[in-house]
Amino acid sequence: MDFELIGLIAVTGGIWLCMMGIGARVWLRKKELDSQGTGNQELSRAIEDLREEVAQIRSAQEQQVGELHERLDFAERMLVQERRPRAIENSGTTPV
């Protein structure tokens, strides 16, 4: 009977040790994932900031390109326009 009790205690102790080992691994993995989560949040925040900055740069660039197109169109209209000499207003007789 003593051997049965010793065997039962050994088996129970082995199961208990396995359960504690599994619990410790789960706890460590959870802690590791939690620490990575804060890093991921910072990374996500940095990415979002960069996206906003790129959007601002794009809108500014689109505005500048639009202004350049307007200026180019104006310059083309001026160059294509026929250059006619204007008549001098009030062209009367000269006092000579």
Image (cartoon, rainbow, N blue to C red):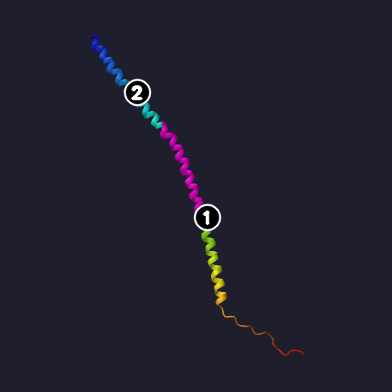
Horizontal side of residue 2 vs 38, given as left or right: left
On the image, the x and y values in percent for residue 34 come to 42, 34
Q: Quadrant of residue 82?
A: bottom right
Residue that mark 2 sits on: 20
Label 1: element kind = helix
Residue shown at the point (47%, 46%) measured from the top left = 47
Secondary structure under badge 2? Answer: helix
Residue 39 drawn in magenta: yes
Left or right: 37 as drawn, with respect to 6: right
Q: Earlier in the sequence, mark 1 or mark 2?
A: 2
Question: Compared with residue 5, is residue 54 higher up or lower down, i.e. above or below?
Answer: below
Residue depicted at x 57% and y 75%: 79
Count of marks overlaid on the render: 2
- Dots 1, 2 in contact, CB < 8 A: no
Q: Position of residue 56 (x, y in %)?
A: 52, 54
Q: Is residue 75 above or below residue 88?
A: above
Amino acid type of disc 2?
Met
Q: Kindly report the distance in space between the C-alpha atoms of the residues bearing marks 1 and 2.
A: 55 Å
The label shown at residue 94 is none
Say what amino acid the circle numbered 1 marks. Answer: Ile
Q: Main secondary structure of the magenta part?
A: helix
Q: Position of residue 91 (x, y in %)?
A: 69, 87
Residue at the extreme top of the image, as rendered: 2
Question: Considering the image in quadrants, where does the N terminus appear?
Answer: top left
Q: Which residues are magenta?
A: 31-60
Residue at 36%, 29% in the rendered image: 26
Quadrant containing the C terminus is: bottom right
Residue 78, given in percent of the width and then of the height, sits at 57, 75
Residue at the spot x=47%, y=47% of the render? 48
Identify the residue under disc 1: 57
Above/below status of 44 relative to 60: above
Q: 10 Å neighbourhood of mark 1: few (<14), some, or many (≥20)?
A: few
